[in-house]
Each structure stands twice: as structure tokens, then as C-alpha cells.
Image (cartoon, helix red, strand yellow):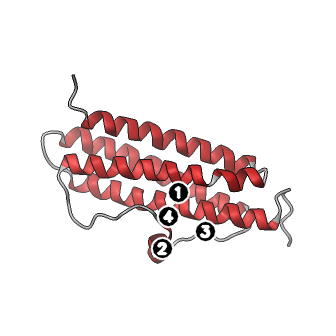
Amino acid sequence: MELNIGIGKKERKEISVALSHLLADSYTLYLKTHNFHWNVEGPQFSTLHEMFMAQYTEMWTALDLIAERIRALGHYAPGSYKQFSELTSIEESDKVPNAEEMLKQLLKGHEAVARTARKAFPAAENGSDEGTLDLLTQRIQLHEKTAWMLRSMLTKGK
């Protein structure tokens, strides 16, 4: 059955491609955060272990929202490691860095996801896709706030 939600076929495709990049970045950052949760060590163990858990739990929920938005636009969401690796802008970490390096990598990752979400805005605006615009705004706010918190943990103070 033909999809008729008030957004043209071409626009829905462009939005879905942009959201697929956001999904890949979000999934890659989710996996990295979960890995760091499992493997963090040092004097800040308890604080970081709990913080990373809160972050990956929030991202897990967001993954569903992003993928379901792609589906609502009539396209299939990417869902394999191969697809994600082709679409993501986030570098994976195959080593276990120290806690400070974990914070730096996650900060870089949250900033990257915010940039990827921001890049999706023109396609959503062009399609008058308020649903996607709302989703993007929420994701940008969350990732920018998380980046600020991570950056604050890396600041030596005055």
C-alpha cells in the first residue's frame, strides 16, 4: 500500500538516509559506551561505571526511536554491524583505554552524534517533516548536554 503522510517519496528517502547515519553513529557510540562501562578501572570506577550505564541505557532507547522513524518514512533501517560500520563517523575502540581516555573518546563521540543529527536537519526541513525535526532536536540536546558533562569531568578546575 502506498505511503501517504504528506512527505514526498524523494524527501522521505533523503531523510531516511540522514537518519540511517544518525542511527549508525548512535549505535556505535552506544556499543563503545557499554564496552567502557564493563571495562572502566581506577579511582573513579563507581562514578564512571554508573554514568556510562545511564548513558548507554538512554542511547538504547533512542536507537529504537530513530529506527522506527526510518520505518515510519517507508524505508528499512540499517541493522547490521557491516551497515553501521559503513555509515558511522565514530571510530571504534578495540583496546581498553584508561578512564581519562574513555571520557575523551566518549566526549568526541557525543559531539560527533550531535553533528550528524544537525546534518540531517536540511533534509527534514525540506520535507516539512516535523516528526523528524523534533527527534533531531531532542537528540542534539541530549548529546550536547552529555558532551558538556564529559568535558566538565576532564577539566582540571580553577
Tell me, yes or no, whether the two marked residues, 4 and 1, touch with CB atoms within 8 Å.
no
Which residue corresponds to mark 2? 86
| Residue 65 seen from this side | no
Q: How far, Cα to Cα, is label 3 from label 2?
A: 14 Å
Q: CA distance from mark 4 to mark 2?
A: 8 Å
- Cα separation between marks 3 and 4: 10 Å
Residue type at tag 2: Glu
Q: Which residue is mark 3?
A: 77
Of 44 and 112, which appears nearest the observer?
112
Whole-angstrom CA distance, mark 2 to mark 1, is 17 Å
Mark 4 burial class by Cα count in 10 Å: few <14, some 14-19, many 20+: many
Q: Within 10 angstroms of label 3, few (less than 14), some, or many (20 or more) residues?
A: some
Front-most of 87 and 73? Answer: 87
Per the image, the residue denoted by label 1 is 63
Is the residue under label 2 in contact with that under label 4 (CB below 8 Å)? yes
What is the CA distance from the residue labelled 4 to the residue labelled 1?
9 Å
Q: Residue at x 71, y 53 (%)?
A: 124
Q: Secondary structure at mark 3?
A: loop
* Disc 2 element: helix
Residue 118 as seen in the image, left or right of residue 82? right
Which residue position is annotated with label 4? 24
Q: Amino acid at mark 1?
A: Leu
Q: Residue 20's spot in the image, x, y percent?
A: 58, 64
Q: Quadrant of the C terminus?
A: top left
In this view, the residue in front, 34 or 123, is 123
Q: Earlier in the sequence, mark 3 or mark 4?
A: 4
Amino acid under disc 3: Ala
Mark 1 burial class by Cα count in 10 Å: few <14, some 14-19, many 20+: some
Callout 1: SS: helix
- Looking at the picture, tell me which residue is in the foreground, 111 or 3: 111
